[in-house]
């Protein structure tokens, strides 16, 4: 279950004769575990219309999003590296609107993979990775034009950069 939902969170209160009916359960952060259940409030007086409850563990609500949900990216983006041209290292940033399998690789002008900076599941948000100008075996690469290629569940993006010595 991905997306942003507007809600208010009230501090816990002691309720006598509390009961409820769970009407939904979901995996908010994409880790494969059920994170919360939502239901309506029931007291000894009957159902409370317009009141929804969110249950998550006991006493705490774990989340996997920044404090301000409005800062989550709305689309996958691959930003220009900086500095460019660079020597000896550069920073590559990318945005993910939701958790995704990601491969971020450095490719030479012939299309051969030189280095792999990210390979695995990455959470939603903006991420930065530094490349030190070294290949897979740890050797410093030659001056020239290189591509950095971001592959996600949503597609492939690439940009070029220049290493000057």
Image (cartoon, grey):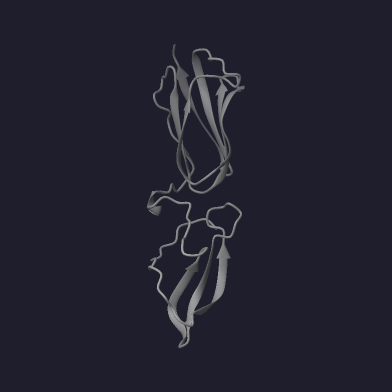
- Identified at 56% across, 15% down, the residue is 139
Q: In which quarter of the image is the N terminus?
A: bottom right
Q: How many labels does the image show?
A: 0
Q: Which of 9 and 110 is in front in this view?
A: 9
- Identified at 41% across, 63% down, the residue is 6
Image position, residue 117 (x, y; %): 54, 30
In-image side of 40 versus 33 (left or right): left
Rendered position, 97 above or below 42:
above
Q: Quadrant of residue 82?
A: top left
Rendered position, 108 above or below 78:
above
Q: Nearer the viewer, residue 42 or 94?
A: 42
Q: Nearer the viewer, residue 26 or 163?
A: 26
In-image side of 87 versus 103 (left or right): left
Rendered position, 79 above or below 10:
above
Q: In which quarter of the image is residue 149?
A: top right
Image position, residue 44 (x, y; %): 47, 87
Rendered position, 127 above or below 9:
above
Q: Quadrant of the C terminus?
A: top left
Q: Which residue lies furthest to the bottom in this view?
A: 45
Image position, residue 152 (x, y; %): 57, 40
- Identified at 40% across, 53% down, the residue is 69
Image position, residue 55 (x, y; %): 50, 67
Q: Nearer the viewer, residue 39 or 75?
A: 39
């Amino acid at each position: 279950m991905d997306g942003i939902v507007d809600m208010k969170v009230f501090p816990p209160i002691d309720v006598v004769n509390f009961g409820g009916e769970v009407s939904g359960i979901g995996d908010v952060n994409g880790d494969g575990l059920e994170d919360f259940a939502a239901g309506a409030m029931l007291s000894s007086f009957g159902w409370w219309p317009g009141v929804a409850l969110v249950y998550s563990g006991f006493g705490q609500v774990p989340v996997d999003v920044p404090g301000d949900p409005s800062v989550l990216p709305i689309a996958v983006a691959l930003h220009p590296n900086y500095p460019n041209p660079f020597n000896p290292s550069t920073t590559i940033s990318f945005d993910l609107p939701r958790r995704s399998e990601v491969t971020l690789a450095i490719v030479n002008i012939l299309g051969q993979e030189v280095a792999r900076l990210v390979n695995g599941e990455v959470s939603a948000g903006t991420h930065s990775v530094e490349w030190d100008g070294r290949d897979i075996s740890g050797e410093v690469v030659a001056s020239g034009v290189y591509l950095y290629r971001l592959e996600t569940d949503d597609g492939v993006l690439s940009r070029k950069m220049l290493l000057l010595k």
